[in-house]
Image (spheres, rainbow, N blue to C red):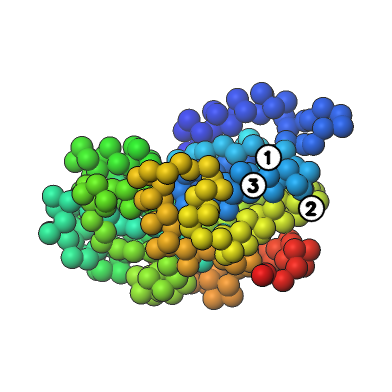
Amino acid sequence: MNRWWQPAFWRALLLLAVLGLGQAPAGAAERLVLMVAGLDKQIYLPVRLAAHLGYFRDQGLDVELQSEGSGVNAEDVLLVGGAQGVVGAYDHTLDLQARGKAVQAVVLFTLSPGEVELVANPLADTFTSPADFKGRRLGVTGLGSSTNLLTRTLALRHGLRPQDYKVVPVGSGASFAAALAQGRIDAGMTTEPLATRLIHSGQARMLVDLRTPEATLKALGGPFPFASLYMQTAWVNSHREQVQQLVTALVRALRFIQQRSPAEIATALGMDDGLERNLYVQALTESRAMYSPDGFMPAAGPPHVQKVVAAVNRTVRDRPVDLSRTYTHEFVRVANARLGPLQ
């Protein structure tokens, strides 16, 4: 699908103009722009922590985080040069390679999608499994997004065809919540902490849980590594020092998640006491198992991701994809060595 008309494309061009094509003043650290497919999402917590805790600064980096509600729009910004990296779903690297774009994940954040399929509470009794998607309007962040991929995968695994249901792009966060509340969608896929907030408020019930590796294995039939930092391969090869600094900061943030309680993590993010903090801590407690402790890609992950993607994505199905070029362990290996054993 040609997406160059979308707003993210034009924002990327404006960003290029504002940043002067990425050039920094002499003697200043080069500014690196990372597009995050929803900065408030817990699946992307490591990059948020790295910024809040000063880990990027400790590596001598000037990193600007920009939030884009849909990963498919974030990748467009990357391809036109408006950002040096995307904090988004690993499966995008397969689709991009199949379309002739060389990108690779340089560090993995989550071992599972961290997503949930929610059903609007008034309709909850009519849903028992994704087989009940038939005839329904299903919310996803965007067409071509990973939530779209996962929604179609769940439907396929329960015997449905794409024409049996309607996928509706509604974005994430507040726009997703509004679509559910207004009845524009019957069910939809979102992530934490929004999922816990909607369940707690009585607006939705959970139908499918993809937050932990165990739940993902049950729902998708295999591992599905998800959140990552991916970058254009050419940029990685020409900026190895900056990539190493980025990855070291992010692996340090992954270690922080392993070493601190959910409550301590909320404090590190500057969250005040109250309901929002409590719900954030609850959500993090229930999904904490999804985080990689070291940033490495599990060996069984990419082949199963390819299998899942190829089942619903004709481009990936019909064109060769070299999985070894969709990720690299070079930088996480060095980062873990520099940081020493995980305590």
First in residue order: circle 1 vs circle 2? 1
Q: Assign a secondary structure to mark 2.
A: helix
- Residue tagged 3: 53
Query: Compared with residue 107, is residue 175 higher up or lower down, i.e. above or below?
Result: above
First in residue order: circle 1 vs circle 3? 3
- Quadrant of the image for the N terminus? top left
- Which residue extends farthest right? 27
Query: Mark 3 or mark 2: which is in front?
Result: 3
Image side of residue 51 versus residue 285, left or right: right
Measure the C-alpha gap from mark 1 to mark 2: 16 Å
Q: Nearer the viewer, residue 50 or 3?
A: 50
Q: Assign a secondary structure to mark 3.
A: loop
Q: Nearer the viewer, residue 285 or 14?
A: 285
Q: Residue at x 26, y 52 (%)?
A: 199
- What crowding class fits label 2: few (fewer than 14 Cα within 10 Å), some (14-19), or many (20 or more)? few
Query: Mark 1 or mark 3: which is in front?
Result: 3
Q: Residue at x 77, y 36 (%)?
A: 30
Q: Amino acid at mark 3?
A: Leu
Task: Residue 222: give x, y in percent of width and height.
Answer: 43, 74
- Residue tagged 1: 63
Check residue 240 in the rendering and tell me which mark sits there, or answer none. Answer: 2
- Mark 1 and mark 2 residues within 8 Å of each other at the beta carbon: no
Task: Residue 341: give x, y in percent of width and height.
Answer: 72, 71
- Mark 3 and mark 2 residues within 8 Å of each other at the beta carbon: no
Q: Amino acid at mark 1?
A: Val
- Quadrant of the image for the C terminus? bottom right
